Image: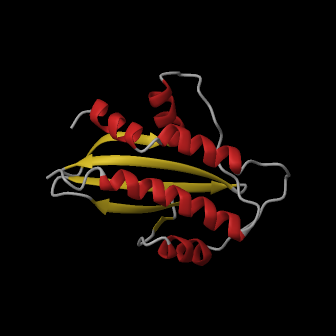
Amino acid sequence: MHKEDILNRLEQIDFLNRSKRLAETHKRDEREEISLSKEDIFEVIKKCGYVPKYNRAGNTYSVTEKVSDTYKIKMAFEIKYSAIDFGWMVYENDKYIFGGPWLVIERELAKDLDYRVGRPVYKSEEEFEEILSTAFQMFRDFQNLFSSIS
């Protein structure tokens, strides 16, 4: 699979507009930071139907899904000051072939190196759950496009 094939799949799930809508719906309008425990974050990820992993060195949370005999996709995120920085990666036979922070993916899809939307920011535990639920639904839609590939 080539980068163009992956970008095509991202276009099929309307990734650019959905990520933009998520960031615009949940933007920072105050400086109040809401702190969530690792356990709280794990619970939300599990509620979304995934098994979470935590990388202490990078302070990131992630899930990796095998979507065919050949492909795995990974969603990772980092939280800084209540802002969530998402990243998606695609692996073919355990070799990275495409992905990175959503900003990089958005710029690829927009065909604009200066494209910038921002990151979704939560102001409550409920809003955090809403953001993750939306991001995981996008991830699930992306996963489904790989289900027929072996």
What residue appears at the point 34 percent right and 41 percent down from the top-left corner? 9
The one nearer the camera, 8 or 69, is 8
Residue 45 appears at what percent x and percent y? 51, 70
22 over 45 or under it: above or below: above
Residue 16 appears at what percent x and percent y? 51, 37
- Coloring scheme of the render? secondary structure
Number of disc labels? 0
Is 101 on the left or on the right of 148, as rendered? right
Residue 79 appears at what percent x and percent y? 63, 57
What residue appears at the point 51 percent right and 29 percent down from the top-left corner? 107
Q: Give the quadrant of residue 99.
A: top left
In this orientation, does residue 118 appear? yes
In this orientation, does residue 59 appear? no
Image quarter in which the N terminus is found: top left
What residue appears at the point 39 percent right and 54 percent down from the top-left corner? 141
Residue 138 appears at what percent x and percent y? 46, 53
What residue appears at the point 29 percent right and 50 percent down from the top-left corner? 145
Is 122 on the left or on the right of 97, as rendered? right
The one nearer the camera, 64 or 57, is 64
Is 72 on the left or on the right of 34, as rendered? left
The one nearer the camera, 12 or 23, is 12
Is 84 on the left or on the right of 47, as rendered? right
